Structure formats: structure tokens, C-alpha cells
Amino acid sequence: MRNYEKYIRYRTFPTPWCPGCGNGIILKAIAICFSELDIKPKDIVVVSGIGCSGRIPTFFNTNTLHTTHGRALSFATGIKLARPDKFIVVISGDGDALAIGGNHLIHAARRNIGIKMILVNNGTYGMTGGQVSPLTPQKFITETTPYGNIEPKFNVAELLKGARASFIARETVNRPRQLKEIIEKSFKHNGFSVVEVISNCHINLGRKNKMRDPISITKWIASRTVTKTQYEKLTPDKRNHIYPVGVLFEDKDRLEYSDLYYKHIVPEAQASIPQRRNQNGK
């Protein structure tokens, strides 16, 4: 393992997260991947929206951008098109990415733009008090579902597959080594990649559902995760509350959006400039 500490902005410590929060595990896993791939800090841009996980870029010693709620992918798309040489990582929570930011997510997937997205799924709006989110499990009690959540959660992998994302994976904070390996694979992929990381919010979600500490809620996460092979053997009625982990889908043949943009659109636009000037008499 290379020295990952050069990617950490220690002067911004301590973190604002609750003791036992999985965001620290995610932060370290990403930093290790930067180190092992030997990406220069000046060539990295980490973008986030609003939420507990939106604070993660604060602690990277790289270019960072903390944007408005749900718009991290929009800002990241602009950066990637303006500076395709930069390595762009988006960190977004389940509310940020799938509620207000859901439209941007499906179109980033459709375009296959070369952004590496870490989608932190703690099943709630943790920063604002624990409201129900698009990934809150059914029957869970939250601030806005005091009698239990009756809404089905998004199947993130199927949603992204339908939107034509070219790399889809899932891991948990319970398994930091596997998490690092999955993130590294996503970083090596040429195209839009999403790693859903199932994390814990024992303060604003767990305590309302008899899981008041990080150990109990991560045990619950472990009890709900299986390998992709194990998941495929389950009957449809048993899959609703089970999460397959690992690389769930990868398409290595799709062309990346900014490559296409600079190959086709930019030359066409540049070639048309003299013609437009002649037509205008200038």
C-alpha cells in the first residue's frame, strides 16, 4: 500500500460525523485507492452535494467542490467536459443522489460520462434529522414515517442498469477490504461508474428501529447482504430486503461521453467558426 495519507487534509479534522459513522471508512477506502493508483492530488476533483456524506470531500487534500443539494453530478459533468484530463469523483448520499438529484443520476448514466460516483446509502436523511429517503427499508420508523415506511425503496442497480450505466457495484462498510477493492475497480473503469456503499446511521435511523449503536446496525447490514451468486438463487419474494454485493454489472464496450465530445463535437464546432465569420462578414 502506498502512502495514502498525502491525500488526507488533516488540518480540517476532527470530522463532524457521529462516533461510529461509516463515512470515515469510506473516506479511507477512497484515499487508499487514490494512492494505489498513484493519481496526483492536483489531478483529482472530488465533488459532493448536501448531507453527512457530502462532508467527505472536506477531508481530501485534492481539488474539492461542495455543491448544492442534488446537483453534484451536474457540477461534475461541467468539470469533466471542461477538463477531461482530471479524475472526477462524486460522493453523494441516498437522498442527495436519488431524490432531488435522481434526474441528474439517470442522465449521467445514460451519457456514460467518465465520473466515478460513490453513492452512500445509509437509508435516511441523516444530517437533517432522519427523514425517510428513497432507500429507507420498508417498515422502518423515521421522523417522517412514525408508523413505519410503506414505500418500496429504489433498486439502485436495476435503476442504473435501465439508465445504461456502464459500471454498477455495491459494497458495505462492514467489509473495508472488499470496499476498497470495489472502489478501485470502479476507478479503473472508463465510463460512468457507481458504487453503492451501504453504511450505518445508528443515531438518526438505528435508534428508532432498535439499533442504537454502530455494532447492532452493521450486524443488521451484514444479515441482509449476500453475494451476487447467492442473490440469483433467491426467489423474487425473498429478494426485497436482500442486497447483493460485488460488481453487479460492467459494460467495457460503451464509449465514454467526454471522449466522444472531444472527438466529434469540438472539431465540428471549431471547423464551423471560420464559416460563421464569413457569413457574418467578419
Image: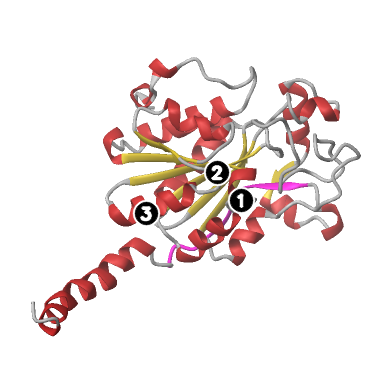
Q: Examine the image and state in which quarter residue 237 appears.
A: bottom right
16 or 68, nearer to the observer: 68
SS of the residue under disc 1: loop
Q: Is residue 89 visible?
A: yes
Q: Name the residue type under label 1.
A: Ile
- Marks 3/1 in contact by CB < 8 Å: the verdict is no
Q: Name the residue type under label 3.
A: Gly
In this rendering, position of residue 19 left or right of residue 236 = left
Query: Which comes sooner in the sequence, label 3 or label 2?
Result: 2
Marks 1 and 2 sit apart, C-alpha to C-alpha, by: 7 Å
Q: Examine the image and state in which quarter residue 50 appears.
A: top right
How far from the left and from the top, in percent, is residue 176? 57, 30
Magenta-colored stretch includes residue 251: yes
How far from the left and from the top, in percent, is residue 90? 47, 44
Marks 3 and 1 sit apart, C-alpha to C-alpha, by: 19 Å
Where is mark 2, residue-wise?
69
Rate crowding at label 3 as few (under 14), some (14 to 19) or many (20 or more) other CA atoms within 10 Å: few
Rate crowding at label 1 as few (under 14), some (14 to 19) or many (20 or more) other CA atoms within 10 Å: some
Rate crowding at label 2 as few (under 14), some (14 to 19) or many (20 or more) other CA atoms within 10 Å: some
Where is mark 1, residue-wise?
100
- Marks 1/2 in contact by CB < 8 Å: the verdict is yes
How far from the left and from the top, in percent, is residue 4? 38, 25
How far from the left and from the top, in percent, is residue 258? 34, 61
Segment tinted magenta in the rendering: 242-253
Q: Name the residue type under label 2.
A: His
Residue at 73% from the left image edge and 33% from the top image edge: 130
In this rendering, position of residue 233 left or right of residue 91 = right
